[in-house]
Amino acid sequence: MSTEFEEMAAQSQDVVGLQFYMMGELSIRRSDGGQIESLNRKEQALLCYLKVNGRSCSRRELEAMLWPHSAKSQVSLRVAINHLRQDGVDQFLDISDEAMAFNQQNHWSDVEALQYQIGQVDKNPQADLQALMHIVDQCQNDFLPGLKIASSPMFEEWKSRQQSRVEQLLIHALERLVLLCSERGDDDHAQHYAARLVNMAPWHRNGQQYLAGIKDSQGDFAQNRSDLSAAIMPAKVQVEHLDSNTDKHIRTILQSDMHPLSLANGRLLFSFHWGETVPDDEQDAFALLWKMVAGNPLALLLMGRLLRERPYLTIFMLNQQLATFQSQFVPGESEHGVTIALAVCHKGLKPSVRDVLKKIVASGWPLFTVSELSEFMQKEPFLIQDNLDHLVRLALLQKVDETHYKMPGKLLLLFQTYIYE
């Protein structure tokens, strides 16, 4: 019996489309069974970029994304388009002198299928879980792991943002499967997905709580995580490596005098760290956010990165949280904008990450390592590492080198001044 996953992948034979398998080894196929195998890495990257973005992209944007340092980027893009034509892929694209886009909506991808199935289960918790289970089992934890364009930092950073998004989608899917399978008495699947959830996100409470409550053969409950070592093999945490330009950009903001930005420049900075363009229907909401944080660059960076880390948040939801904290501070207070932004970020942290942040502030160390913090907190290094990586992605911490971390001076001062419970 075919699953909904397979039915979605097997597109109608009347209108042939493309199928993108991106969560694992990349495969681009025709829905009528034909393979597309002769594409080089940049041509594959071009198609994936167009598919994931789901919009018309200008030639100038594509040239900057894939051939940033080439004096002949226009020629390189034309050569790539000619190759796509030779392979018959151009029938799926709208190509003009100015832009490119896919020309129909029946092109399928595993990322979109995962997002769709999560939405179905979120809307109706009583729905059949088979389709979501099938696609979760088919998908790996990585986005385009084998597709690397070393000559294009912009593409690698875009891919890194998509990796964060894919991880959040999978964590959300696994969380739902653990809870719903457990509620339905399907303990085997609940245990399977809980173990994968803990491997992928060791901090996750639902996976830990479920596994900690599994009865052994004598009916006794496991009392701690070490009893489950056979079921849980901690995976190596994937660290998001920022390219040098982005890292320099963050450091400049953290060390600057924080002059307020105009609405237009604030929107650019916010969008850069979010990884998305502010939608037309949220322009007014962003203007309100910009006003509440007083155009503070660091505050806008934190809010953008918070949305990037938590894709289910919206600008409207951020505004509600900002307004709550805004009422607690005196208008015109020094660092007012970044203070309420920090309050929102701090409240949105997982309890274990919040605990790590408090310990860092309390320690007063100018520089520290994972092992030092692990010993200080008496917790496993891999748990500490995951939390530190999360704080780095939010730019609440800086990674000085491959070993040492530090809290930026401005943030350290604010965290020492205000305690957000």
Image: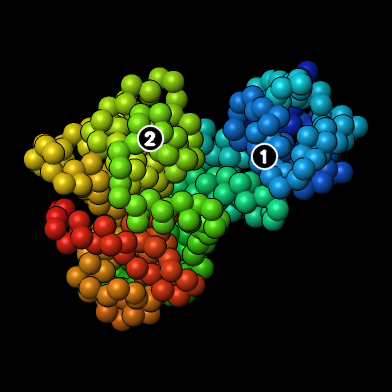
Residue at horizontal 14 percent and vertical 58 percent from the top = 417
Q: Is residue 343 above or below residue 367?
A: above
Q: Is residue 359 above or below residue 110?
A: below
Q: Amino acid at mark 1?
A: Ala
Q: Nearer the viewer, residue 282 or 111?
A: 282
Q: Nearer the viewer, residue 270 or 385?
A: 270
Q: Is residue 220 visible?
A: no
Which residue is situated farthest in the right direction here?
86
Q: Nearer the viewer, residue 329 or 54?
A: 329
- Residue 265 in the image: state x and y as whole percent: 41, 33
Dot 1: element: helix
Give residue 331's quadrant in the image: top left
Residue at horizontal 16 percent and vertical 40 percent from the top = 325
Distance from the alpha carbon under mark 1 to that under mark 2: 23 Å
Q: Is residue 101 above or below residue 195?
A: above
Instruction: Look at the image and name its color scheme.
Output: rainbow
Residue beneath disc 1: 64
Left or right? Give the position of 27 relative to 190.
right
Residue beneath disc 2: 266
Q: Is residue 296 visible?
A: yes
